[in-house]
Image (cartoon, grey):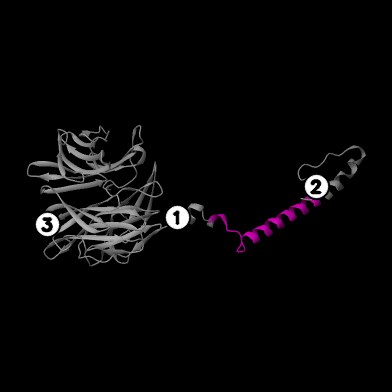
């Protein structure tokens, strides 16, 4: 803008100069148009300096979220003997993750263990019983160690990996069913059944004790823990599904307001007293996925728009603060993931896999700023084998 110039309303006309107003207006109009031309030229010049390629039309502009949002990419996994089954995936950080399960050998099941080092997956066959019949279950990080549940030819034990290598802690008794396992510094639990009924076994670092469940509990579906004196289990009781809590003294009914006619797939004890539960509610025989969250004061239930048969067993809290879980894909050659952030649910797809007729992520884990998935993929004409995908990183 030139000094002394005014853009806007015309200055008022006074006295005998009224006859010259038309000429004045034409002069002023020319001045205004000239100024506008100068301004337009300056804008174009500035834009060319900032973006030599020119101005991006609004219709093709990329939002900041889209510019930084990573996609899912495929990770190579050494093949196992198909068909394979994935049990669990857990990550300590971006450079250490473990995936467990079992493969099909000619004489039965064989345990399967894979390790992620931040760059690639490799198979570990150095643990005790690696070549014997059996399977591997849940992975837990206890201090600097890795603890994994191992069914070794029907006998239960906990594999422990430290700086000195692998060792095993046998269970005090053999169970018919080993349902679940969890471990934290100072304690570990194994739940299952034998010929006398429900069993809850606790390890305190030196030995095992058997714990009693509340009256009316028929079966324990799963167990997890935040500390040695704060553990949770979800159960089938004679009145329906229920959540139990260990307070360091006894297992008690946690009085969680589960939706009517529902079950529990998973329970996430989170920092600052938060708890997130995922499961299915049945109405007229139709399943509907629900999430039940405790913020330290009250429970709140939401029903994200997921397929009714979606299991929340693989649900994790992602590095972005949202809940992530694999869901049934509507594309034969791609996996599908749901991201639940409060009331908003969005979906993303894994990379395309040639000739894949079934891609199934079975477990998810947060690995630093990335998400890892581990599961199976069935290529047309073959049995399911291993797959892994990563979001971010």
| Position in image of residue 227 (x %, y %) | 28, 41
Mark 1 sits on what residue? 69
Position of 4 compared to 254: left or right? right
* Disc number for residue 340: none
What secondary structure is marked by label 1? Answer: loop
Query: For the residues carrying marks 1 and 2, which lies nearer the camera in this image?
Result: 1
**Direction from residue 110 to residue 119 in the image, left or right:** right
| Magenta span: chief secondary structure | helix
* Mark 2 Cα shell of 10 Å, populated few (<14), some (14-19), many (≥20): few
The residue sitting at 82% across, 41% down in the picture is 11
> Which label's residue is closer to the chain start, 1 or 3?
1
What's the residue at 13%, 41% (across, down)?
198
Q: Secondary structure at mark 2?
A: loop
Residue, disc 3: 153
**Tag 1 and tag 3, C-beta contact below 8 Å:** no
Q: Is residue 337 above or below residue 268?
A: below
Q: Which residues are magenta?
A: 30-59
Q: Residue at x 45, y 55 (%)?
A: 69
Q: Earlier in the sequence, mark 2 or mark 3?
A: 2
């Amino acid at each position: 803008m030139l000094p002394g110039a005014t853009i806007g309303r015309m200055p008022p006309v006074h006295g005998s100069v009224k006859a010259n107003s038309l000429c004045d207006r034409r002069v002023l109009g020319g001045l205004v148009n000239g100024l506008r031309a100068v301004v337009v030229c300056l804008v174009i010049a500035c834009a060319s300096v900032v973006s030599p390629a020119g101005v991006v039309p609004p219709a093709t502009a990329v939002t900041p979220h889209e510019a930084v949002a990573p996609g899912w990419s495929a990770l190579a996994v050494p093949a196992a003997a198909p068909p394979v089954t994935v049990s669990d995936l857990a990550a300590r950080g971006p450079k250490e993750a473990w995936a467990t399960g079992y493969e099909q050998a000619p004489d039965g099941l064989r345990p399967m263990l894979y390790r992620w080092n931040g760059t690639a997956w490799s198979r570990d066959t150095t643990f005790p019983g690696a070549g014997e019949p059996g399977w591997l279950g849940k992975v837990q990080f206890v201090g600097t160690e890795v603890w994994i549940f191992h069914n070794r030819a029907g006998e239960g034990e906990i594999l422990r990996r430290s700086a000195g290598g692998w060792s095993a802690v046998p269970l005090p008794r053999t169970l018919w069913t080993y349902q679940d396992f969890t471990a934290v510094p100072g304690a570990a639990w194994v739940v299952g059944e034998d010929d006398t009924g429900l069993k809850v076994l606790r390890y305190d670092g030196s030995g095992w004790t058997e714990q009693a469940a509340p009256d009316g509990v028929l079966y324990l579906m799963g167990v997890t823990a935040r500390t040695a004196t704060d553990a949770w289990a979800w159960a089938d009781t004679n009145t329906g599904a229920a959540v139990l809590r260990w307070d360091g003294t006894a297992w008690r009914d946690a009085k969680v307001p589960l939706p009517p006619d529902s079950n529990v797939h998973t329970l996430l004890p989170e920092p600052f007293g938060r708890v997130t539960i995922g499961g299915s509610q049945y109405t007229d025989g139709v399943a509907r996925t629900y999430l039940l969250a405790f913020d330290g004061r009250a429970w709140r239930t939401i029903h994200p728009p997921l397929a009714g048969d979606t299991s929340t067993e693989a649900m994790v809290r992602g590095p972005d603060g949202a809940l992530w879980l694999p869901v049934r894909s509507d594309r034969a050659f791609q996996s599908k993931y749901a991201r639940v952030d409060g009331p908003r649910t969005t979906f993303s797809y894994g990379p395309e896999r040639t000739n894949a007729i079934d891609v199934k992520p079975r477990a998810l884990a947060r690995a630093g700023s990335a998400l890892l998935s581990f599961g199976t993929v069935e290529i047309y004409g073959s049995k399911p084998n291993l797959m892994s995908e990563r979001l971010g990183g």
